[in-house]
Image (cartoon, coloured by chain):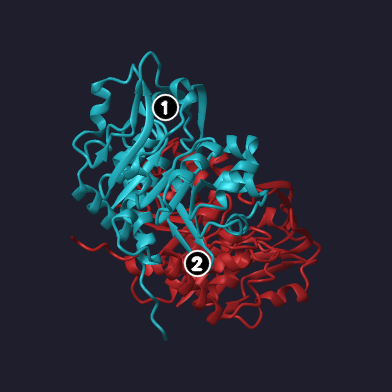
Chain colours: A red, B cyan
């Protein structure tokens, strides 16, 4: 079974209190693909410029990632983001965003991309997300990410696509911004009322809350002694989460919970180094080992009745 | 087995976005005692003024709370705190603090208070906490709470008492303030290096992290649709946590984890109404039922090996 992801492949320049990385590989679809490929075949749909060389593309090689959908435009430059973090690593300050080749990106999906089992619409303008969704032959699971910018500038279009997806992956602050609800659980039910069956709320270093019509699952983030760079943690989470789900025959509540943990495991690796430096070096058995650490981290027994 | 708590019994005036309560019952030892009394016998050590009437004292009646240590000083007024919360209920803004009778409080413990199994030193000036500790005949477990004020103004005295207690219950921001470490896990190990065997870090709506020398346990807060007033949540948590531990013969890692959940359960009730209005009406079976809800909230299975 395969997953199609439509998003950015980018260069990032990042400064954190622990160092900096200039023009390293980034982008939502990059983090997502590498993470998801631990579990599922990925169809990557993105665009890069001429400056994205073979050395850069190497990040995708030797993994279950099909690059037929990675368009390289001659004479154009790759999407570029520059940002910095203070000691509160939960908040990124954008210094510069250059859309470059992404500005004119009109993805046209080929047959295998259209027929994927799972579709991930990474953060992008909601009308672009809708255009991609229209091309697909109703995947088993459609998930969407978004950002504060689209809530502020394209709320109607965002609301339309929210009503057509199965699952929304969104930051805590964005739930409050979109709904105007201070209470997160009420905000979540507001969004579920629009159509999605599941809301996965990312809370940075505090972990994840998954809300459905009748249940909530809470997972902490893995407590790390070294967090170097939170860039890409959300997309890595989405990749691990959907990658795992894409490999399952049935998408039950129990599988969704396991998927949340695998997503959290992969995100915890991403932040240990800059860019994809940590993610690219880990093995599946390291991922599975940290899954066991999450069990130890969260486990408690029932109490004894008197 | 019994628990001695030394702290405040107070009147609070509270404003939240959901309403206000004038001159309602509050205080660290009040929330702590009522919560702990679900599991253990509590020896309450605190002082009130003449304005704290029999109707007010009724909050402690009919529970396992011994009031021999509740001193009532004629002609004096009870500790008073006034505060407000915005939509971010994690942050209280103090409008007024009047120490009143608490300013001259020099607790003298009687024999049963000195011989308690568990001692909780609620937030107070570290030298007062040390004076109480010196009076005790080495309890099985000594736990301490503190606040940003003492970190800023009495750090040396605080450091001395930190080195003599078994367990510290502290806010996330206070760990960072005390240690100067941005990374919470590193900050926790810094404090453990001073002597305590266990650090329980309160993270408000994000739950609790318990850190020991070789393990971490993460518990989420219970996701509530109605949070009216977070006042007292931390002391209620401490009461449920230590009250449960006080009722156990052995304090194992497994019991500590259960205790964290019981503390979280009780705190989740406290915030549902103003003051102790919710806490005073709940039953042990409602507490146990919500413990089960925490199991559902956090449970995930091991993954299947291929």
At mark 2, the secondary structure is loop
* Mark identifier at residue A13: none
Foreground disc of the pair 2, 1: 2
Q: CA separation, marks 2 and 1? A: 38 Å
Subunit of mark 2?
Answer: B
Looking at this rendering, what residue extends furthest in the top direction? Answer: B75
**Residue topped by disc 1:** B17
In this rendering, would B103 be left or right of B267? right
Please tell me which residue is depicted at 61% across the width and 55% down the height of the picture: B187
In the image, residue A225 sits, relative to residue A113, either above or below, namely: above
Instruction: Pinpoint the chain carrying mark 1.
Output: B
x, y (%) of residue A13? 76, 57
Residue furthest to the bottom: B306
Q: Which of the two residues, B194 or A279, is positioned nearer the viewer here?
A: B194
| B300 sits left or right of B278 in the view | right
Q: Is residue B274 above or below residue A132?
A: above
Q: Pointer 1: residues within 10 angstroms few (<14), some, or many (20+)?
A: some
Badge 2 crowding class, 10 Å Cα cut-off, few under 14, some 14 to 19, many 20 or more, is few
In terms of depth relative to the viewer, which is nearer, B248 or A24?
Answer: B248
């Amino acid at each position: 079974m395969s997953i199609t992801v439509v998003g950015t492949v980018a260069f990032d320049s990042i400064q954190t209190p622990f160092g900096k990385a200039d023009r390293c590989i980034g982008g939502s679809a990059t983090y997502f693909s590498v993470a998801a490929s631990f579990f599922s075949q990925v169809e990557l749909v993105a665009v890069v410029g001429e400056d994205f060389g073979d050395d850069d593309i190497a990040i995708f090689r030797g993994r279950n990632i099909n690059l037929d959908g990675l368009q390289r435009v001659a004479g154009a430059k790759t999407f570029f983001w520059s940002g910095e973090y203070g000691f509160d690593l939960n908040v990124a300050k954008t210094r510069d965003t250059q859309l470059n080749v992404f500005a004119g990106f009109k993805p046209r999906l080929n047959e295998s991309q259209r027929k994927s089992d799972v579709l991930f619409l990474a953060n992008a303008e909601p009308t672009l997300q809708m255009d991609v969704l229209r091309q697909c032959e109703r995947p088993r699971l459609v998930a969407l990410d978004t950002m504060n910018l689209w809530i502020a500038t394209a709320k109607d279009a965002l609301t339309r696509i929210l009503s057509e997806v199965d699952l929304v992956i969104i930051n805590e602050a964005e739930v409050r911004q979109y709904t105007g609800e201070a209470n997160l659980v009420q905000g979540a039910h507001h969004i579920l009322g629009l159509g999605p069956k599941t809301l996965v709320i990312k809370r940075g270093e505090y972990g994840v809350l998954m809300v459905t019509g009748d249940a909530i699952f809470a997972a902490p983030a893995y407590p790390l002694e070294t967090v170097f760079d939170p860039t890409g943690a959300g997309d890595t989470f989405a990749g691990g989460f959907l990658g795992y789900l894409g490999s399952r025959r049935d998408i039950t509540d129990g599988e969704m919970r396991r998927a949340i943990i695998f997503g959290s495991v992969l995100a915890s690796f991403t932040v240990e180094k800059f860019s994809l430096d940590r993610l690219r070096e880990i093995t599946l058995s390291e991922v599975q080992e940290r899954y066991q650490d999450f069990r130890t981290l969260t486990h408690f027994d029932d109490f004894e009745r008197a």
